Image: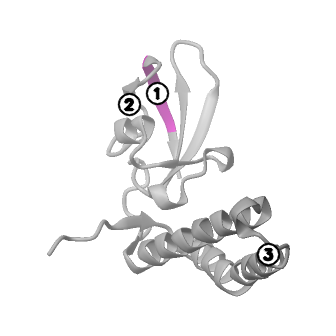
């Protein structure tokens, strides 16, 4: 028996996944079935690109539903630790500057299931998060990235 992977996430992140799952099951699934039925009415399925596209979309939707169900079932909610406010940890927002003269950047460290760099949420598996987790405000940290090493100074943790 293999252990299933845990998915660390915030409560809000889990709720977002649950909403996406509900949408896929109640709305998107029906839309795809309708597209398949319409495409079938066009006749010969062997040369029917609409049918092929709808079947591909159906496969994608069903695999996404399975993935979301697994992630929700194995979600590990990150509890906010109010005791240590100056230490970088999962669920916290860390602000740092790249040394010697970089701009200030802020990211919330979340589980891979809810990571969205465009919203300032980075995965705990990312090189930056791995380097910063467990560190404190004021520390200078070397971050190993695919593009090379960079040194950052942590200036705030919320």
Kindly check if marks 2 and 1 are in contact, taking CB atoms under 8 A apart as contact.
yes
Spatial distance from mark 2 to mark 3, Cα to Cα? 56 Å
Q: Secondary structure at mark 3?
A: helix
Q: Earlier in the sequence, mark 1 or mark 3?
A: 3
Q: Is residue 103 above or below residue 108?
A: above
Q: Point out the residue furthest to the bottom here.
A: 26
Spatial distance from mark 2 to mark 1, Cα to Cα? 6 Å
Q: Is residue 80 above or below residue 155?
A: below
Q: Residue at x 47, y 70 (%)?
A: 67
Residue extent of the magenta highlight: 149-155
Q: Is residue 13 visible?
A: no
Q: Earlier in the sequence, mark 2 or mark 3?
A: 3
For label 1, the residue is 153
Near mark 1 (Cα within 10 A), the count class, few <14, some 14-19 or many ≥20, is: many
Q: Which percent across, then down, holds residue 9?
A: 46, 66
For label 3, the residue is 35
Q: Quadrant of residue 55?
A: bottom right
Kindly check if marks 2 and 3 are in contact, taking CB atoms under 8 A apart as contact.
no
Q: Is residue 76 magenta?
A: no
Q: Which percent across, then down, holds residue 124?
A: 41, 49
**Which residue is more in the foreground, 127 or 60?**
60
Q: Is residue 62 visible?
A: yes
**Which residue is more in the foreground, 31 or 119?**
31
Q: Quadrant of the N terminus?
A: bottom left
Q: Nearer the viewer, mark 2 or mark 3?
A: 3
Q: Which percent across, then down, holds residue 70?
A: 42, 75
Q: Residue at x 36, y 40 (%)?
A: 130
Tally the numbered discs: 3
Kindly check if marks 1 and 3 are in contact, taking CB atoms under 8 A apart as contact.
no
For label 2, the residue is 139
Near mark 2 (Cα within 10 A), the count class, few <14, some 14-19 or many ≥20, is: few
**Which residue is more in the foreground, 69 or 36?**
36
């Amino acid at each position: 028996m293999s252990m299933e992977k845990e998915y660390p996430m915030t409560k809000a992140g889990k709720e977002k996944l649950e909403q996406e799952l509900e949408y896929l099951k109640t709305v998107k699934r029906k839309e795809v079935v309708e597209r398949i039925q319409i495409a079938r009415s066009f006749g010969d399925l062997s040369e029917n690109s609409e049918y092929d596209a709808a079947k591909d979309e159906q496969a994608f939707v069903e695999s996404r539903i399975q993935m979301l169900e697994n992630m929700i079932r194995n979600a590990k909610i990150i509890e906010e630790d109010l005791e240590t406010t100056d230490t970088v940890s999962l669920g916290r927002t860390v602000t740092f500057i790249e040394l010697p003269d970089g701009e200030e950047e802020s990211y919330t460290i979340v589980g891979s299931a809810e990571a969205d760099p465009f919203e300032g949420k980075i995965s705990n598996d990312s090189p930056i998060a791995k380097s910063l987790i467990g560190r404190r405000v004021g520390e200078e940290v070397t971050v190993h990235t695919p593009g090379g090493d960079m040194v950052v100074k942590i200036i705030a943790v919320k």
